[in-house]
Amino acid sequence: MANPKEARDSAGPAPAGAATAAPPPPADTVSCTIDGVPVTVPKGTRIIEAAEIAGVGISHYCYHPGLSAPAMCRQCLVEVQGMPKLQPACVTTVADGQVVLTESDRSRAARESNLEFYLLNHPLDCPICDKAGECKLQDFTHAEGRSHGRSVEPKRVLNQDDFGGAVLYEGDRCILCTRCVRFMREVAGNDALCVVQRGHRSVIDTFFEQGLEGDLWASNIVDICPVGALLSKDFLHKARVWDLDKEPSICPNCSQGCNITIETRDNLVARLRPRANSDVNSYWMCDVGRYGYDWFNRGNVPTGTLGNADTIGGGPNPTGRVEQPMVRDRTGRLRAASWQEAVRALVERLTALRGRGGVALVSPMFANEDAGLAARLLEVLGGGERLYRSEMAAEEVVCPGFPRLARRRELAANGRGLSAMGFRRVGDDSGAGALDALDVTGKLLLVLGDDLADSGESFGAGAGLFVYLGAFPGAAERNADFILPVTYFSEQEGTFTNLEGRVQRFWPALEPPPLARPAWQVLGVVLAGLEDAPAPASAASAFLRLGQLHDAFGGLSYDQLGARGALLNDPVRLAADSRR
Amino acid sequence: MMGNGATGATGATGGTTPLQGGNPGWAGERGEFTQLSEADVRGSEYVGRRPANGGVGGAVSSMPYMLPEKDPNAPLFEGPYAERLQKILARYPDRQGALHPVLNMAEELHGHLTPQALSRVAEVLGLAPAYVRGMATFYTMYNRAPVGRYFVQVCTNVACNLCGGDAVLQAFLAETGTEPGETTPDGLFTVMEVECLGACGFPTAVQVNSRYFENVEPGDVPEIVRQLRAGEKSTDAGDGGAN
Amino acid sequence: MAYPYRHEKETRVLSEHFGDPVARTLDGYRKRGGYQALARAIEMGRDAVIDEVKASGLRGRGGAGFPTGVKWSFMPREKKGPHYLVINADESEPGAFKDRELLRWTPHQMIEGALIGAYAIQAEHVYIYCRGEFFEPAQVVARAIEEAYNAGIAGRNVLGTGVAIDVTLHLGAGAYICGEETAQLNSLEGRRGQPRIKPPFPAVMGAFGRPTTINNVETVSAVPHIINRGSAWYKGFGTEKSAGTKLYNVSGHVVRRGNFEFPLGFPMHELIYDVCGGIRDGRQLKAVIPGGSSVPILRADECDIDLDYESVIAAGSMLGTASVIVMDDRTCMVKQVRRMVDFYTHESCGQCTPCREGTAWLGKILRRIEEGQGTEADLDLLLDLSANMTGTTICVLSDSAAAPVVSSIAKFKDEYLGHIHDGACPVAAVAVA
């Protein structure tokens, strides 16, 4: 089955953007009214899509814009004037002059009745259901359902079923919309789920003991399940969804740049979920990315305990994270310093090194803004090697139903962005190596984020100045002259450039340790002491600065990137990158 | 009949002649096919015994859906069955189209569809095992658990029900001493209720393996069970239904 | 030769050879004029065949009554790939048992009609979708197909004309819904037998994604006769809008059950009281379901009607498959309606919510009423649910489940009230087993 969403996307912004785009030639469009709202859409647009453009919501379960539409849930039945029966809005195409009534007595009655049918065997166990709060059955029933059930009959009771992988199935809650079955077939390309039996005995199941284990895409079915039938083992009873704080972000776990939402509770990541972007990941993300969030939490402690007087100013640090700037004193000991002290001392040392150049080793898990100013600092000092190390997977795994999406070989979120700024990848595919070969004698060694886990005892010892910006001091503690606490991508605003060359924004989702600062801010302040450039006051202005420094980013701005991102000025074809 | 099933001969009134002899089980024996033998009605001689390889291509997917001899471990798609598989595949534009006749073959040999058989069918047809499971469980004739040598399915739908289908079902259950769907300890009988068999003019219709018994009344049931037990009636239907 | 009973008033066209074992063989069929129509049809040409069938007024005998020639004309005239003809032999409507007789007594008649149809719509392959339970009739058809291939009637060179038409018998595996034509196509393709959303219609995208026509066994069995004797002759039977003869399959509480062939428009009263010998055991008629369990029930006083498509609709029901289920005055309507609803519950494919959930709910309420645990409010609930299940689903199985509930409450409300108030069946004293 062709992916209808993909077909829609390949036609460019229409029809989703039809409302705002200039009207296409009249021959290709049809006009109708939906609940009195006139709307003009391309021919072949379905009522449910046209209604969205018109600002009319039509409740639905089986329809999902990324999947085929079986028109079987019957929740989206609407009255189309002149047609004797109610029509499923998800498959009925808009005709010229059509009058659609979603709020007519017949339409409303059909929805109310359908919801009553759904609740017949539904356990109404919302208080213990992970989906409560974002459940479409709950939402639509609350909006339009009957206030009292009329059934006195016993309900169907089923056991929880482990679908393998990261997914559990609660058959009692299932409304048999088959989104999950269709996702596995049409998008994951792995027919691992089926409806077994028929009629009211139907349930979703796998092939006996063979389940979803090993499938890279399976957890998307938990997201698209409109009710609490499919549960994530990882998120099981972890949080009520209304307690979650949600911020849009970019998955950092490979170079695909899937758009995600980071959902946190008490300053800890509870789950990641994909955000729709038809240029990058459609509605989906892979399970490796989805569950690879533990490291965002590393060094974070729940709100409330963070900021406790005991942990600030030299108290016990339970996480090992750098909590304040550290400067090596004359005795060779690292000593805590205020930011003001540290920056002043650093500018002084850097000024002395002017003209010597050096080496910048930047982690590709850091933002374009961070890396860009690191590169600038090196340039101001007289230039030198810009390097990064990154992990590569053994192979690329393409999403069969949406081939633009893949788990990429390049596992670093921003390798492409660093390349665009003249950084060169060194080391091996495990993200290690190449450190011993660096010649930094008498020069600046600037390390941003790289954990230096494989560095030798004397790494950086001979450098003219060793500056380490990171969250964990790690190996840098041995020889670094400065250790400056910076924020993770998840704690700051910024951009990543994905493998395709698409620059995409992310927003702060977690609260950093009180004294950690974004690297672009630290470097900006330091640079202001070295050259005649004001320190950028915001990530947006740091990004504009990047545009002045690197043609690839020229002319781009946060406003322009918007929610979908924009391509670099020197896009390298995705295919060439991924098939090298 | 009509709640008076004990005598088995009372139903014949009006235009039909009384029951001849005490050998119940098909419409003819109610005197309705006055000059025809059972073989004439069933067409047994015309059909003859069909070869295990399925015979001519157009008829290849019409083999019995269940043999009395069931071996859940019998190898699939070997010997004449391999030949039949090839003939089946030739009848459909894609391999998925062959799913029904190929599942039929598995059930014919095994008596029910085991996970291993579903898996093997999926492999042969290049389909996902879960897909095959979903498809097979939609259809009630694909047994998911073993059934007895004689799988007795009694129609209790409206036309038979009006004429005592429920009582016939009860009679079979009583005679075999089982609950619906349960198999007798000797492995001979599994009795179940079934939806309309499409023999509404000959109530109550009872299907035993591949063969229909018609006009069955509760009083006929002991004799039918006795005959089956004694192996006097073939339900193989691979031989065209002849005795 | 009596099978099982031949009434002098019958007009036997399709059923002429019922009960004649020789007629089912190829030789026997040929001696009785078989396969002349096929040769003649190929001589006439496709368009002429379709015109002839259109002119005959033949309507689909599977229940919907759609004009067959018109259906054939929906197929693309310009062939861009395979076309298919599917013969619907999935007879499973409770009350219907006509196709089974056609299959087992006159398999060649059906094959000939199918080949003519396939020729007319340029189908290169005929699939005969026969319900799996019909194993014995299927064996007869299988043998007939074998004979047809061996005699050069089916295959690469039909009757030496160069026309190529394959015939394949395909057995279902137990699903009433596969009688619905798009569900049948899904089943034929090796899928779950779930009805498809239309459009696209089968004539555009049917079996295996190709243009397909689905015809009932009885429909195609009439075709050789129309080609042999002309559309005018066929149209001479029946009424203006319901032309031709029809197999009336009568079951239930009549003296003589069976298949009886009459021109459409035959009076129901005459069918029950004369042809079928009246009600068994001297009882009184209580109700009739005139077209298989999916159509509304008629009370005894509504049964003085002619059995053609239009007249039965005028009486508030439908002719359907002309499967007349007769109920006498000992029949508990609540029980029978509950049994029918149980059937639809069992057979619902489960795609559409109102049907999947509604059929089971109706059944549970009806069972409570039947067992004396119902309330009067349950009747309103049944009617409301039935309304909510009607016209809201992909196919009409849901509507079919609701129809007997609505019509029985309208017509036999006292019986429901009796169960509700007295906790027992008012006709229990004389109830059937």
Image (cartoon, coloured by chain):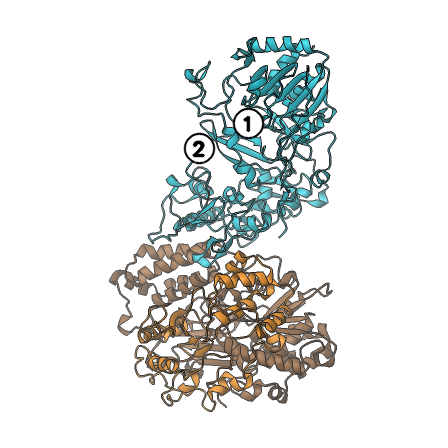
The total of numbered circles placed on residues is: 2
Colour given to chain A in the rendered image: cyan
Cα separation between marks 2 and 1: 21 Å
The brown-tinted chain is C
Query: Which residue in the rendered view is the most extreme toward the front?
Result: A457
Residue C286 seen in this snapshot:
no
Residue A533, above or below A213: above
Image height of A541 relative to C193, above or below: above
Q: Earlier in the sequence, mark 2 or mark 1?
A: 2
Circle 1 is placed at which residue position? A490
Q: What is the letter of the orange chain?
A: B
Q: Amino acid at mark 1?
A: Ser
Circle 2 residues within 10 Å: few <14, some 14–19, many ≥20: few
Q: Quick check: marks 2 and 1 in contact, CB under 8 Å?
A: no
Q: Position of residue B126 (x, y in %)?
A: 60, 60
Seen at 47% across and 79% down, the residue is B236
Chain letter of the residue carrying label 1: A
Residue C1 appears in view: yes
Residue annotated with mark 2: A242
Quarter holding residue A370:
top right
Residue at point 65%, 18% (across, down)? A445
In front of the other: C155 or A525: A525
What type is the residue that disc 2 sits on? Trp
Task: Give the camera-side residue of B78 and B6.
Answer: B78
Q: Secondary structure at mark 1?
A: helix
- Foreground mark, 2 or 1, reads 1
